[in-house]
Amino acid sequence: MKPIVSRLSSLAVPALFILAVAGVPIAVGAGAPQPNAAGVPVGTVPADKQARIDAGNRQAAAAQAKLAPDAKAKDPGAPAAAPAAMAAAAAANGDGYLDPHFPVGSGMVVVTHDPPPGDSTIAVANMWSRQGPWLFVYAGSDAASPTTGLVVIRDRQSEVARIPVAGHGALQITGGSDAALTLTAADSTVLTLDLSTQTIH
C-alpha cells in the first residue's frame, strides 16, 4: 500500500489539469498574485487600497460611457427628441429598463428607435406596451415619407393596425391611459389614439 503523501501527490497533477481546462487560474508558486481587470497583479497592494482602485476604474468606465456620443442622436433621419418633461420622467425611473421610459396606464412607454419585428417601414420614436392582454403600440413616421406620422399596433403574434397621419410629421406617445394614448406630432399637434376603435383624432 502506497504512503498517503504519495497517493495525494499522484492526485495533484490530474486535479491541476482539470482546473486548467476549466479555466480556473492556478498560481504557479505559493502566493503568486493574479492580475485584476486592469492587468495589475492583485496582492501587490493592500486589499482595501485594491478595492478603492477597482471602484475608481469602474467609475471612470461609467463616466467614459456617458461621454460617448449617441449614434442615434446624430442620425438626421431620426425622429425629434422626446419632450423635456418626458425625458425627465424617464430618467427618474431606476427600475432596470435600459432605455429611457415612463409609465402610462398599466403599460410603459419606452424611448426606442427599434422597429417592430420584421418591419422596416416605420421610423420609430417610441413605443408603449402592456401585459394582459399584450399590446404594443409603435409611434413615429413613415420611413419613406418622414412628414407622414405613423402608428403601428401589434399583439404578440402579428400586426393589428397601421394608422398613417399626414401633414404633422413624426408622432410620439406622450401620455394617456389604457383606453387612449396621447400622441404629439413634430409640429406640436396633439392627437388621441383610441385603442378600442384603433382610430386617431
Image: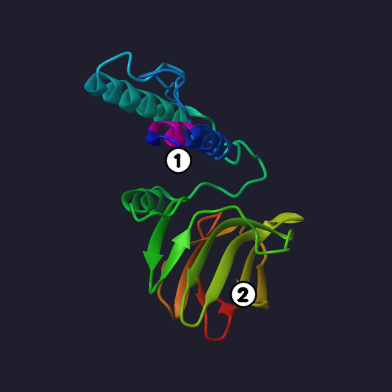
Left or right: 157, with 181 as reference point? right
Which residue occupies the extreme bottom position in the image? 197
The answer to which quarter of the image holds residue 30 is top left
Q: Measuring 50% from the left and 54% from the top, which residue is drawn there?
A: 111
Kind of element beneath mark 1: loop
The answer to which quarter of the image holds residue 59 is top left
Position of the N terminus by quadrant: top left
94 to 137, vertically: above or below: above
Which residue occupies the extreme front position in the image? 1
| Residue 151 on the magenta segment | no
Q: Residues within 10 Å of mark 2 (few under 14, many from 20)?
A: some
Between the residue at mark 2 and the residue at mark 1, the CA separation in whole angstroms equals 74 Å
Indicate the position of residue 93 as horizontal and vertical percent values.
33, 53
Q: How is the image coloured?
A: rainbow
Indicate the position of residue 4 as horizontal and vertical percent values.
39, 36
The magenta segment is 5-9
Q: Measuring 40% from the left and 47% from the top, which residue is drawn there?
A: 84
Q: In this view of the protein, can residue 146 be seen by the observer?
A: yes
Nearer the observer, 61 or 19: 19
Left or right: 1, with 168 as reference point? left
Q: Measuring 65% from the left and 40% from the top, which residue is drawn there?
A: 76
- Specify the label residue 154 is tagged with: 2
56 to 195, vertically: above or below: above
Which residue is label 1 attached to? 1
Position of the C terminus by quadrant: bottom right
